[in-house]
Amino acid sequence: MPDEELIDIKFRLYDGSDIGPFRYSSASTVDMLKQRIVSDWPKGKTIVPKAVTEIKLINSGKILENNKTVGQCKIPYGEVPGGVIIMHVVVQPSLAKTKTEKKIDDSPRKIVCSCSIL
């Protein structure tokens, strides 16, 4: 039985800093990578993911699906054997958490007129 291929991956954040590199099995899922990113997120960043669902991973211009394995996402051309793969991390907080606007009341208004007729 051949040894399972190990792949070095580092994650590039929005400000150009990196998390990693870490070594993963080619059978690791994208969801597992996202869990690692959330747990190892650097302190002091202005944008912080609260959950795995707020993260998108991009490799070679493609958004990676959670159920895909690292081996399935690896692009064979352009990657140097034994090199480190750089995946870009996009954080998109859920809409419910980012709404800071006041809710506009669209209910009809009653107009009260206090006119006196002489």
Image (cartoon, grey):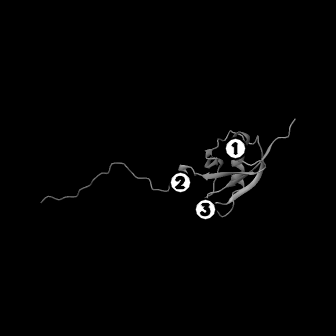
Q: 20 above or below 4?
A: below
The kind of residue tagged 1 is Tyr
Quarter in which the N terminus is drawn = top right
Q: Read off the residue under disc 3.
A: 46
Q: Secondary structure at mark 3?
A: loop
Q: Secondary structure at mark 1?
A: loop
Q: Residue at the spot x=39%, y=51% of the render? A: 105
Task: Classify 10 Å Cα crowding around label 1: few (below 14), some (14-19), many (20 and above).
Answer: few
Give the Cα distance between marks 3 and 1.
35 Å
Give the Cα distance between marks 2 and 3.
14 Å
Q: Read off the residue under disc 1.
A: 77
Q: Position of residue 8 (x, y in %)?
A: 76, 50
Q: Are marks 2 and 3 in contact (CB under 8 Å)?
A: no
Give the Cα distance between marks 1 and 2.
39 Å
Q: Secondary structure at mark 2?
A: helix
Quarter in which the C terminus is drawn = bottom left
Q: Position of residue 97 (x, y in %)?
A: 55, 52
Q: 111 above or below 62?
A: below
The answer to which quarter of the image holds residue 4 is: top right
N-terminal-most mark, 3 or 1: 3
The kind of residue tagged 2 is Thr
N-terminal-most mark, 2 or 3: 3
Q: Read off the residue under disc 2.
A: 98
- Foreground label between 2 and 3: 3
Q: 95 above or below 47?
A: above
